[in-house]
Image (cartoon, rainbow, N blue to C red):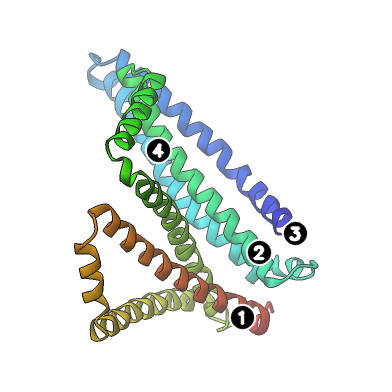
Amino acid sequence: MVAKLTKHELRSYWKTFLPLWGAMLVLAVINGFTLRTMQDVEGAMGFFTHVVPLLVLFGMLVATCVLTLVLVLQRFYRGLLGSEGYLAFTLPVSRRQLIASKLISSLVVEFLSVLVVCLTFLLLGLVLTEADIFAGFGELFTMLRKLFAEMPHESWMTVLFCTEGLVLTVVGAALGTLHFYAAMSLGHLSGKYRMPLSVVAYVVLSVAGSWVMTLLGQLGVEAGLFRHLEVLMDSSSILKSMTLGMGVAILLDLAGAVILWAVTEYILEKKLNLE
């Protein structure tokens, strides 16, 4: 059921983002050709052929980032805390499944937006410099193979480190999104001043998270945990130390995400008031 709900959520996103993403990629190619073929144009014509297209492109890049955040928040608020909540909660699904579908779809859109932004800059650079994209990827793969060949004993650690990096990115994005979800859910409890108190709840959750991290750090110092970690890191390679540190970061982010999920689910299950 989560898959069906996620598919429905993504369909609502595609209506807005697919034209925007496509327009950005097309503008990147157009800007590349324009800047490459009309480098000697000056004056008003140069302004309209060089500056204006670039301003439009970067404006769309900024709009994509802002619009992604706005729509992610809007889909959760309207879909579960607003008028659409009446329909959502009549479906034969649990609150957990509804939150999961919102979170998964938002993460997909967030990562695709980042990917499209990166592709936009890549296309602009490739067209502008007349680079061969396939040759570039070939050189990248050759460099990676050489990197693995030069450290055969730690190649598995490199794979683990890269995997942890991807996991940390996903968990960190989920933590950030759930932070907004929990803040909006807490603000919803006020009834009358939901939006202002959602902002206050977001700040309070941020401060609480920082306070917990500080407290954990102090407990770690008192328990001698960091001293043991320093000994372990000194006896290991730099790559192993970084892998260990990233693993700890993943666990901390995951714990925070679980707590924020629990707060959101509890409010939707026990304290929700759509009137």
How far, Cα to Cα, is label 4 from label 1?
Answer: 38 Å
Q: Residues within 10 Å of mark 2 (few under 14, many from 20)?
A: some
Q: Earlier in the sequence, mark 3 or mark 4?
A: 3
| Residue 56 shows in the view | no
Residue at the disc numbered 1: 266
Marks 3 and 1 in Cβ contact (< 8 Å): no
Kind of residue sitting beneath label 2: Gly
Q: Residues within 10 Å of mark 1 (few under 14, many from 20)?
A: some
What residue sits 36% from the left and 33% below the top? 121
Position in image of residue 96 (x %, y %): 66, 70
Position in image of residue 13 (x %, y %): 61, 48
Secondary structure of the residue carrying tag 1 is helix
What residue sits 38% from the left and 23% below the top? 138
Residue at the disc numbered 2: 79
Comparing 152 with 128, the one in front is 152
Comparing 98 with 153, the one in front is 153
Q: Residues within 10 Å of mark 4 (few under 14, many from 20)?
A: few
Comparing 204 with 96, the one in front is 96
Q: Which mark, residue 118? A: 4
User: Which quadrant holds the N terminus?
Assistant: bottom right
Kind of residue sitting beneath label 1: Tyr
How far, Cα to Cα, is label 2 from label 1?
Answer: 17 Å
Marks 4 and 1 in Cβ contact (< 8 Å): no
The answer to which image quadrant residue 256 occupies is bottom left
Tell us which disc is closer to us: 4 or 2. 4
Residue at the disc numbered 3: 1
